[in-house]
Amino acid sequence: MATSKALVFKQFVAANKITHAYIIEGVNEELQFDEILTFIKLLVCDNAACNECSICSMVNNGNMADLKIIEPEIGAKVIKKEQILDLKRDFSKKNTEDSPQFYIIKKAELMNAHAFNSLLKFLEEPDDHIIGFLLVNNIKLLPETIKSRCQVLTYTEQINSLSDYIKINALDEEGIDKINMVISLVNSAMSGRADMIFKKHQILKLYNTGDALKDCLKIMILALNDRLKEGLGTHIIAKCDKIEGDRLTNKQLANLITELGLLEEDLSYNLNKTIAMDKILILLQKRGA
Ligand SMILES: [Zn+2]
């Protein structure tokens, strides 16, 4: 399933063009994260990311000592400077001449200004043994100083927009109607219209399993991401409806997309569907107000 992206990394490894920091841009963080793990396994496993040896399982289970993962702390909306400083401290403790050390920063656009500065210092004095990955939804949200020091990989083959979603899932008119209902619910919630409640019940009937609701949330995120891309100057050709208006700044939209993305993780833990939908709607209402 993920072969195409793994190939990109494999080619990098083959060409020996490994740099010390990558920005991985795309909307499917889970998929990108898996890709990075594959890349790391290719570098540390003696058997080309066999997924069977003890090293591969350490990477897969997140208990490889030389792999640090940074993301907003639970309940936090930013990545703090201290988290970057901790990373530096951990890495400097160990003086591993040959074995590489890795860090992954999830939702890297949520670093606050202090965190960006600390990271920048880290990037300015590159250590050949340290390889970093910054996962972002949209690279335009990163400071130029960070971007210029990283190798950028944009995942274009994956689902990055609603058009991709429609194409990849080969949706017919009925499928597009379902998407339009989701967008209509988002529009109602964001503009505080009373028909939201009715639409919510419709959607809960249509997307009536945990996985289906996850899909519904994905559609919302893609629609908002399309809106963000338009806000950043990309013309989006849509086969379906769009998110109305432009009451949100690009930064607010980006934050909203990230927060909805966090709910996507909640949904993986079997959260009650109605509660999950209410959480989604509260976020949309709050941001849209
Ligand atoms: Zn292995």
Image (cartoon, grey):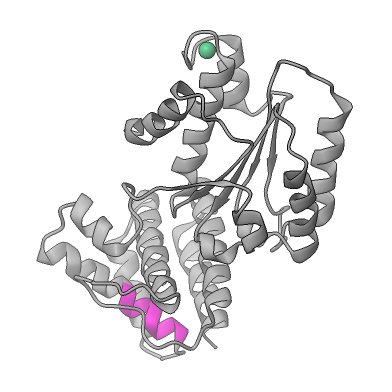
Residue that sits furthest to the left in the current view: 173
Query: In the image, is residue 259 above or below residue 95?
Result: below
The number of discs equals 0
Q: Which residues are magenta?
A: 183-190
Quadrant that contains the C terminus: bottom right
The reply to whether the magenta stretch includes residue 271 is: no
| Foreground pick, 230 / 150 | 150
| Foreground pick, 88 / 60 | 88
Q: Position of residue 135 (x, y in %)?
A: 56, 49
- Asked which quadrant contains residue 112, the reply is bottom right
| Foreground pick, 127 / 254 | 127
Q: Position of residue 110 (x, y in %)?
A: 65, 61
Task: Please state if 80 lies on the left or on the right of 62 as rendered.
Answer: right
Q: Residue at x 65, y 55 (%)?
A: 146
Q: Residue at x 45, y 25 (%)?
A: 15
Q: Position of residue 118 (x, y in %)?
A: 80, 53
The majority secondary structure of the magenta stretch comes to helix
Task: Please state if 227 lies on the left or on the right of 254 as rendered.
Answer: left
Query: In the image, is residue 284 above or below residue 138?
Result: below
Task: Please state if 189 lies on the left or on the right of 147 as rendered.
Answer: left
Quadrant that contains the N terminus: top left
Q: Residue at x 63, y 20 (%)?
A: 58
- Asked which quadrant contains residue 131, the reply is top right
Query: In the image, is residue 36 above or below residue 86?
Result: above
Q: Position of residue 195 (x, y in %)?
A: 36, 88
The reply to whether the magenta stretch includes residue 185 is: yes
Q: Residue at x 34, y 48 (%)?
A: 158
